[in-house]
Amino acid sequence: MNAVEEATAGRVVAIDGKTLRHSYDKKKRKSAIHMVSAFAAENGVVLGQKKTDDKSNEITAIPALLELLDIKGCIITIDAMGCQEKIAEKIISKEADYILAVKDNQKQLHNEIIDFFQTALKYNFKGVQYDYFEEAHKGHGRVEMLVTGLVIR
Protein backbone atom coordinates (compact mmCIF):
# COMPACT_ATOMS: atom_id res chain seq x y z
CA MET A 1 0.00 0.00 0.00
CA ASN A 2 2.99 2.36 0.38
CA ALA A 3 3.37 2.51 -3.42
CA VAL A 4 -0.33 3.25 -3.81
CA GLU A 5 -0.21 5.87 -1.05
CA GLU A 6 2.68 7.64 -2.76
CA ALA A 7 0.88 7.61 -6.11
CA THR A 8 -2.27 8.92 -4.39
CA ALA A 9 -0.71 12.16 -3.09
CA GLY A 10 -2.60 15.10 -4.60
CA ARG A 11 -5.25 12.83 -6.06
CA VAL A 12 -8.93 12.29 -5.41
CA VAL A 13 -9.98 9.97 -2.61
CA ALA A 14 -13.74 9.34 -2.71
CA ILE A 15 -15.41 8.44 0.57
CA ASP A 16 -18.78 6.77 0.37
CA GLY A 17 -20.97 4.45 2.38
CA LYS A 18 -22.70 1.32 1.18
CA THR A 19 -24.95 -1.26 2.75
CA LEU A 20 -23.76 -4.81 2.12
CA ARG A 21 -26.46 -6.75 0.34
CA HIS A 22 -27.89 -9.78 2.12
CA SER A 23 -25.97 -8.95 5.31
CA TYR A 24 -29.09 -8.68 7.47
CA ASP A 25 -30.42 -11.57 9.49
CA LYS A 26 -34.18 -11.48 10.05
CA LYS A 27 -34.19 -14.43 12.44
CA LYS A 28 -31.60 -12.88 14.76
CA ARG A 29 -32.96 -9.37 14.17
CA LYS A 30 -29.53 -8.21 13.02
CA SER A 31 -29.55 -5.18 10.78
CA ALA A 32 -27.57 -5.00 7.56
CA ILE A 33 -23.88 -4.11 7.69
CA HIS A 34 -23.10 -0.60 6.53
CA MET A 35 -19.50 0.20 5.50
CA VAL A 36 -17.73 3.46 4.68
CA SER A 37 -14.90 3.13 2.16
CA ALA A 38 -12.09 5.39 0.97
CA PHE A 39 -11.46 4.81 -2.74
CA ALA A 40 -8.34 6.12 -4.52
CA ALA A 41 -10.05 7.06 -7.79
CA GLU A 42 -6.97 7.20 -10.01
CA ASN A 43 -5.49 3.97 -8.67
CA GLY A 44 -8.79 2.10 -8.50
CA VAL A 45 -7.98 0.82 -5.03
CA VAL A 46 -9.89 0.91 -1.75
CA LEU A 47 -7.48 2.46 0.78
CA GLY A 48 -9.55 1.63 3.83
CA GLN A 49 -12.97 0.75 5.19
CA LYS A 50 -14.81 1.28 8.46
CA LYS A 51 -17.98 -0.44 9.58
CA THR A 52 -20.55 1.92 11.03
CA ASP A 53 -21.57 1.23 14.59
CA ASP A 54 -24.98 -0.29 15.21
CA LYS A 55 -27.67 2.39 15.36
CA SER A 56 -25.25 4.91 13.85
CA ASN A 57 -24.39 6.17 10.37
CA GLU A 58 -21.63 7.51 8.13
CA ILE A 59 -21.32 10.75 10.12
CA THR A 60 -19.51 8.95 12.94
CA ALA A 61 -17.68 6.40 10.78
CA ILE A 62 -16.11 8.89 8.35
CA PRO A 63 -13.88 10.66 10.94
CA ALA A 64 -12.75 7.26 12.26
CA LEU A 65 -11.86 6.16 8.72
CA LEU A 66 -10.04 9.44 8.02
CA GLU A 67 -7.99 8.91 11.18
CA LEU A 68 -6.62 5.67 9.70
CA LEU A 69 -5.53 7.21 6.39
CA ASP A 70 -2.56 9.29 5.27
CA ILE A 71 -4.44 11.77 3.08
CA LYS A 72 -1.97 14.64 3.16
CA GLY A 73 -2.22 16.58 -0.10
CA CYS A 74 -5.25 14.63 -1.34
CA ILE A 75 -8.65 15.93 -2.39
CA ILE A 76 -11.35 14.15 -0.39
CA THR A 77 -14.84 13.92 -1.87
CA ILE A 78 -17.87 13.02 0.22
CA ASP A 79 -21.58 13.09 -0.55
CA ALA A 80 -24.11 15.23 1.32
CA MET A 81 -24.27 12.85 4.31
CA GLY A 82 -20.67 13.78 5.13
CA CYS A 83 -21.18 17.55 4.91
CA GLN A 84 -20.38 18.16 8.57
CA GLU A 85 -18.08 20.70 10.24
CA LYS A 86 -16.25 18.05 12.26
CA ILE A 87 -15.54 16.03 9.12
CA ALA A 88 -14.24 19.11 7.27
CA GLU A 89 -12.07 19.99 10.29
CA LYS A 90 -10.66 16.43 10.39
CA ILE A 91 -9.72 16.63 6.69
CA ILE A 92 -8.03 20.01 7.17
CA SER A 93 -6.14 18.73 10.23
CA LYS A 94 -4.74 15.93 8.05
CA GLU A 95 -3.53 18.56 5.52
CA ALA A 96 -5.94 17.59 2.75
CA ASP A 97 -8.58 19.48 0.77
CA TYR A 98 -12.21 18.54 0.42
CA ILE A 99 -15.23 18.70 -1.83
CA LEU A 100 -18.43 18.15 0.14
CA ALA A 101 -21.83 17.90 -1.49
CA VAL A 102 -24.51 20.15 -0.06
CA LYS A 103 -28.20 19.46 -0.50
CA ASP A 104 -31.33 20.43 1.34
CA ASN A 105 -30.16 18.30 4.29
CA GLN A 106 -28.23 21.45 5.27
CA LYS A 107 -30.96 23.96 4.39
CA GLN A 108 -29.30 27.12 5.75
CA LEU A 109 -25.87 26.28 4.30
CA HIS A 110 -27.45 25.33 0.97
CA ASN A 111 -29.29 28.65 0.79
CA GLU A 112 -26.16 30.61 1.78
CA ILE A 113 -24.19 28.97 -1.03
CA ILE A 114 -26.91 29.77 -3.55
CA ASP A 115 -27.01 33.38 -2.32
CA PHE A 116 -23.22 33.65 -2.54
CA PHE A 117 -23.10 32.49 -6.14
CA GLN A 118 -26.06 34.61 -7.21
CA THR A 119 -24.38 37.71 -5.72
CA ALA A 120 -20.96 36.80 -7.15
CA LEU A 121 -22.43 36.26 -10.61
CA LYS A 122 -24.35 39.54 -10.42
CA TYR A 123 -21.07 41.42 -9.82
CA ASN A 124 -18.98 39.21 -12.13
CA PHE A 125 -17.08 37.76 -9.12
CA LYS A 126 -15.56 41.16 -8.34
CA GLY A 127 -13.61 40.94 -5.06
CA VAL A 128 -13.80 37.14 -4.99
CA GLN A 129 -10.57 35.19 -5.36
CA TYR A 130 -11.18 32.17 -7.54
CA ASP A 131 -9.69 29.83 -10.10
CA TYR A 132 -11.52 27.86 -12.72
CA PHE A 133 -10.70 25.26 -15.32
CA GLU A 134 -12.20 24.95 -18.78
CA GLU A 135 -12.32 22.17 -21.29
CA ALA A 136 -13.14 22.62 -24.96
CA HIS A 137 -14.76 19.82 -26.94
CA LYS A 138 -15.24 20.03 -30.67
CA GLY A 139 -17.54 17.72 -32.55
CA HIS A 140 -20.83 17.41 -34.40
CA GLY A 141 -20.34 20.88 -35.90
CA ARG A 142 -20.08 22.72 -32.58
CA VAL A 143 -17.59 23.69 -29.89
CA GLU A 144 -18.59 23.14 -26.27
CA MET A 145 -16.83 24.97 -23.43
CA LEU A 146 -17.24 23.26 -20.09
CA VAL A 147 -16.21 24.74 -16.77
CA THR A 148 -14.94 21.66 -14.97
CA GLY A 149 -13.94 23.18 -11.68
CA LEU A 150 -14.35 26.37 -9.70
CA VAL A 151 -12.26 27.00 -6.61
CA ILE A 152 -13.29 29.85 -4.31
CA ARG A 153 -10.52 31.01 -2.00
Image (cartoon, rainbow, N blue to C red):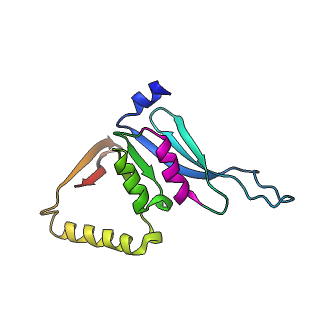
Q: Residue lying at the far top in this picture: please name it.
A: 3
The magenta segment: 57-70
Q: Residue at x 47, y 61 (%)?
A: 80
* Quarter residue 104 falls in: bottom left
**Which of these two is toward me, 75 or 116?**
75
Q: Quadrant of the C terminus?
A: bottom left
Residue occupying image coordinates x 39% and y 56%: 88
Residue 31 lies, in percent from the top left, at 74, 59
76 w.r.t. 83: above or below: above
**69 in magenta:** yes
**Picture layout, residue 28 above or below residue 145:** below
Q: Count the labels in the image.
A: 0
Of residue 139 and residue 57, the one placed in the foreground of this image is: 57
Q: Position of residue 114 (x, y in %)?
A: 32, 70
**Secondary structure, magenta segment, majority class:** helix
What x and y, as percent, mark residue 120? 20, 67
Question: Residue 55, position in %: x, y?
Answer: 66, 63
